Image: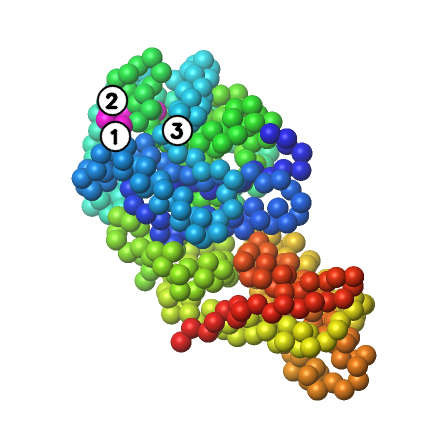
């Protein structure tokens, strides 16, 4: 993998115990937006997503559905893969943890950690939350002993397992955090991670007694590798060990509930295996309904494909990226989505594009020079996009682009462009507006890729003469 002029971004791999909900779509759309932004800047992008099939909850879901486990995971993997395709996600790879390439990579990394002296056998007793696929401490539970997220009581498990010497990496992790002050974003998540590590790290169980499903521990068929020790390795599976050594992931995107796995356990595993660490772990908040986290286990999920069918994939992308401040929790309601869609997309961008294209198709426009006020508005927009994208302020980026749209709308109204009699003045006004619309479309390419393509295709310059091909209504108003 050529590491020059390249960008490597990942989503987490998602459990296949149910189909995708809007929370999964949000994390994936964030990653897709960043991938497209880099691609627009001329970088070669490696963008991976996929599914985690080796969890106990997968076995439970297959049994609940009355399906054979292999048939179940094949069916569910197809649903996840096709969902991202239907939402226009531009991933370059889709990892399944049952694939032979992944199993081989997991065994390789296990062997490296074992060779480093960081894998040993011991007995463990702990409270295991199936929802998290992780052990929990008593002080992490509610007063009545429940997992605060899944509202279920963890199971007391006593097993002889293989352990990972996570405690060996406490000081090394703290030194790494000190040297890489933006390793986790937003900053308050980084503070939580650092405080957790400073509080002391315990060795963790890295295998389970032989279950009916999972990757066997090398040389011990009575144990399977713990799902997180397997799942995190998917990021290496995508590019191979040599590829990772040459260019590890630049950004891992995920929801806040799995940051600790990615910012503590994952870098410790990589240190043990003698491999480089990723550049950054960035965390979205949760999407809630009535203040409650969307969760398959709680049954209050929203289907992203249903929304995309009614509002378009770009309509869904716009709402999530504009409405939710990155890193914070956001509350979803379809009423809010409909309001934003009609106000910002139908009446805003869609209406502005239609007005400009309708006016421009009646004129023979030649390429010219922008008026100063348009030069300024385009410069301000581009600067805001660049500055805000580097700190993942997607909502602020879109707000800056919509300032330019509003400016263009006001210009049309105040100048009454359709009434300008002087040919040179009318041509200049239209050139200003066409240039503004064209640049807005370019700026929107990472956010609203289909809409951007339609606008760009409508504005074709041939030998410095504009040929307008009006598209259908970009965003039909929803009643």
Query: Would residue 24 appear left or right of 297 to someone viewing this image?
Result: right
Image spot of residue 35 (x, y percent) = 56, 46
Label 3, residues with CA under 10 Å away: few <14, some 14-19, many ≥20:
few
**Circle 2 SS class:** loop
Q: Which span of residues is magenta-colored? A: 206-213
In which quadrant of the rendered view does residue 81 lie?
top left
Distance from disc 1 to disc 3, alpha carbons, whole Å, reads 30 Å
* Residue 216 in sight: yes
Q: Main secondary structure of the magenta part?
A: loop
Sequence order check, earlier mark of 1 and 2: 1
Label ID, residue 210: 2
Label 1, residues with CA under 10 Å away: few <14, some 14-19, many ≥20:
some
311 within the magenta span: no
Return the residue at label 3.
99
Quadrant where the C terminus sits is bottom left
Q: Residue at x 47, y 71 (%)?
A: 476
Image spot of residue 282 (x, y percent) = 50, 44
Query: Would residue 226 appear left or right of 168 to someone viewing this image?
Result: left
């Amino acid at each position: 993998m050529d590491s020059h002029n390249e960008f490597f971004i990942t989503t987490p791999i998602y459990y296949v115990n149910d189909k995708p909900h809007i929370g999964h779509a949000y994390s994936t759309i964030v990653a897709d937006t960043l991938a497209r932004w880099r691609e627009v800047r001329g970088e070669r992008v490696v963008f991976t997503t996929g599914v985690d099939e080796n969890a106990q909850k997968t076995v439970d879901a297959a049994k609940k559905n009355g399906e054979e486990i292999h048939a179940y995971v094949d069916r569910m993997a197809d649903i996840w893969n096709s969902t991202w395709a239907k939402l226009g996600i531009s991933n370059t790879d889709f990892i399944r943890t049952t694939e032979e390439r992944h199993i081989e990579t997991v065994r390789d990394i296990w062997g490296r950690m074992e060779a480093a002296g960081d894998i040993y056998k011991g007995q463990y007793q702990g409270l295991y939350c199936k929802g998290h696929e992780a052990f929990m401490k008593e002080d992490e539970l509610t007063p009545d002993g429940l997992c605060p997220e899944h509202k279920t009581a963890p199971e007391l498990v006593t097993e002889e397992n293989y352990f990972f010497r996570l405690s060996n990496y406490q000081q090394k992790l703290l030194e790494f955090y000190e040297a890489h002050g933006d390793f986790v974003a937003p900053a308050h998540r980084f503070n939580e991670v650092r405080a957790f590590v400073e509080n002391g790290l315990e060795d963790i169980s890295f295998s389970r007694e032989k279950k009916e499903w999972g990757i066997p521990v090398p040389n011990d068929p009575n144990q399977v590798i713990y799902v997180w020790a397997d799942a995190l390795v998917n990021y290496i599976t995508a590019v191979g060990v040599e590829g990772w050594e040459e260019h590890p992931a630049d950004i891992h995107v995920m929801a806040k509930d799995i940051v600790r796995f990615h910012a503590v356990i994952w870098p410790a595993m990589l240190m043990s295996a003698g491999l480089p660490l990723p550049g950054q772990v960035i965390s979205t908040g949760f999407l809630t309904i009535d203040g409650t986290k969307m969760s398959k286990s709680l049954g209050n999920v929203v289907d992203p494909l249903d929304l995309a069918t009614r509002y378009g994939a770009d309509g869904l992308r716009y709402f999530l990226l504009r409405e939710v401040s990155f890193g914070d929790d956001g509350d979803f309601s379809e009423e809010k989505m409909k309001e934003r869609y009609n106000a910002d997309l139908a009446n805003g961008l869609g209406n502005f594009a239609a007005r400009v294209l309708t006016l421009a198709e009646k004129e023979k426009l030649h390429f010219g020079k922008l008026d100063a006020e348009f030069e300024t508005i385009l410069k301000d927009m581009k600067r805001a996009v660049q500055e805000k994208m580097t700190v993942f302020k997607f909502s602020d980026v879109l707000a800056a682009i919509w300032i330019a749209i509003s400016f263009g709308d006001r210009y049309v109204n105040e100048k009454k462009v359709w009434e300008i009699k002087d040919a040179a003045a009318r041509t200049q006004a239209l050139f200003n507006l066409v240039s503004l619309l064209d640049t807005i479309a370019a700026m929107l390419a990472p956010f609203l890729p289909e809409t951007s393509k339609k606008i760009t295709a409508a504005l074709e310059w041939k030998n410095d003469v504009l040929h307008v091909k009006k598209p259908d209504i970009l965003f039909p108003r929803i009643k």
